[in-house]
Image (cartoon, grey):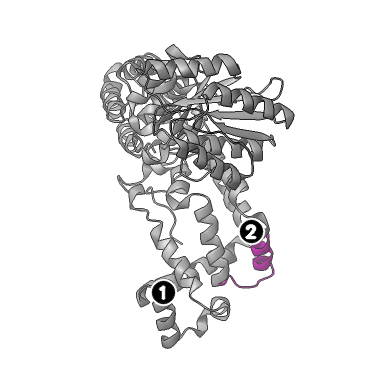
Amino acid sequence: MFENLTERLSGTFRKLSGKATLTENNIQDALREVRRALLEADVALPVVKDFIDRVSNRAVGQEVSKSLTPGQAFIKVVQAEMQAIMGSANSELNLKSVPPAVVLMAGLQGAGKTTTVAKLARLLKTKEQKKVMVVSADVYRPAAIKQLETLASDIGVEFFASDASQMPTAIADAALREARKQFVDVLLVDTAGRLAIDQQMMEEIAALHAQLAPVETLFVVDAMTGQDAANTAKAFNDALPLTGVVLTKADGDARGGAALSVRHITGKPIKFIGVGEKTDALEPFYPDRIASRILGMGDVLSLIEEAEQKVDKKKAERLARKIKKGKGFDLEDFKEQLTQMQNMGGVASIMDKMPGMGAMPPGAANMVDDSQFRRMEAIINSMTMRERVNPDILNGSRKRRITQGSGTQIQDLNRLLKQHKQMQKVMKKMKGGGMANMMRGLGGMQGKMGPGGMPGMPPGGKFPRF
């Protein structure tokens, strides 16, 4: 997400290098580029106009301190205003009520409401240790009820069965009674997808809202609809007292206009952002971290949190102990590292949160392809355990068997062996610190500016070669 906007803004900031003060003349071109970049990112026009005015008022005449370049000073202003537009801080769910706290989910057809209900249920269960029940009041799409039942079973939360022959209000009433009986903390209610212009459907959800008196009414909206997402959210907000917005399918949108528009137009905070199809792909929306990502500064905090949640700590500690004792880093260990990386969303997801992405050559991030890592995994899976532990025994016949079994070529296997050798050298230097040392290094980069006003990048804007 935001790749296009990050690329355009980074080029703009570099042009400001060498100026002693930010004046109306020398930031005029930069503001014009920022305006064009935001419009291309599908940010709503009123939001763009207000944003540019506020940045201009704050930036003009600002003295550039000796520790900052003009590009960095301008970034600082742009980042602050971006945060202000998206909300100053993460807005958490308000679940302080007599259990069960009811959360009503509304949205258009196809926005991903049912999947989002499951994602939110999982997040509340794992992070907040809440007992969660989910129910579907979508009587117009029986498949939605079945889908929610399957998802609830997968993530291990309570599911209240409903039927397409029932009235949505009757389903909600029965679910609420059952949630009280089972001492459930949070009841998540999925509703039918509807259009803002569909008067009958809007009246139905208004009746559901009046009956349930939810503590949270979340509007689920597809980020890929761009500025239309903000306009639709506003139409729903006029008919229903929304308390927040969930942006879905953000991983498929390279523009990011919806994230910058929704809060400004609706006045409602974006509380969560969906970044993938799996049930763990829902993140709290942090405006400061998102602004940092847009400006190519990375998102180290989210990267560390993700590593803590998704990296298998026992396996990581076992590898650290092994390397500390001077034992080799074999192909089985390499495979584990590939799996851990995939668990964190793959290389593209990790790179998106790495500092200095704005200083990468244009289009470099799009060249990352996770399929090569899946290919590596397939090759290692075709090996015997003896071959994984001691790859030096791989001769011609063994290599042919492995490549035939994994559907790859000899050159793919040779490339893997070469990269494994390079990783062995890196692991020796890490002396057992593993992921912890790497993350501490990333944390130390936060706030440090590199060439061209981009933080944390090595000279030349390239990642170190392993």
Q: Is residue 382 above or below residue 317?
A: below
- Give, as a single range, the part of the protein colored magenta: 316-330
Query: Is residue 239 visible from the viewing direction of this image?
Result: yes
Residue 297 picture location, percent across and down:
45, 37
Identify which residue is drawn at 44% across, 13% down: 239
Q: Main secondary structure of the magenta part?
A: helix
The quarter of the rendered structure image containing the N terminus is: top left
Q: From the viewer's side, name the closer residue of 186 and 411.
A: 186
* Mark 2 crowdedness (10 Å alpha carbons): few <14, some 14-19, many ≥20: many
Q: Report the residue marked by disc 1.
A: 413
Tell me which residue sits at (57%, 21%) in the image. Answer: 216
Residue 446 appearing in the image: no
Q: Position of residue 39 (x, y in %)?
A: 28, 26
Element carrying mark 2:
helix
Query: From this viewpoint, which residue is outermost toward the front?
Result: 165
Question: How far is the residue under mark 2 from the one under mark 1?
Answer: 25 Å
Instruction: Check residue 316 in the rendering and tell me which mark sits there, or answer none.
Output: 2
Where in the figure is residue 187, as x and y percent of width and height?
Answer: 63, 29
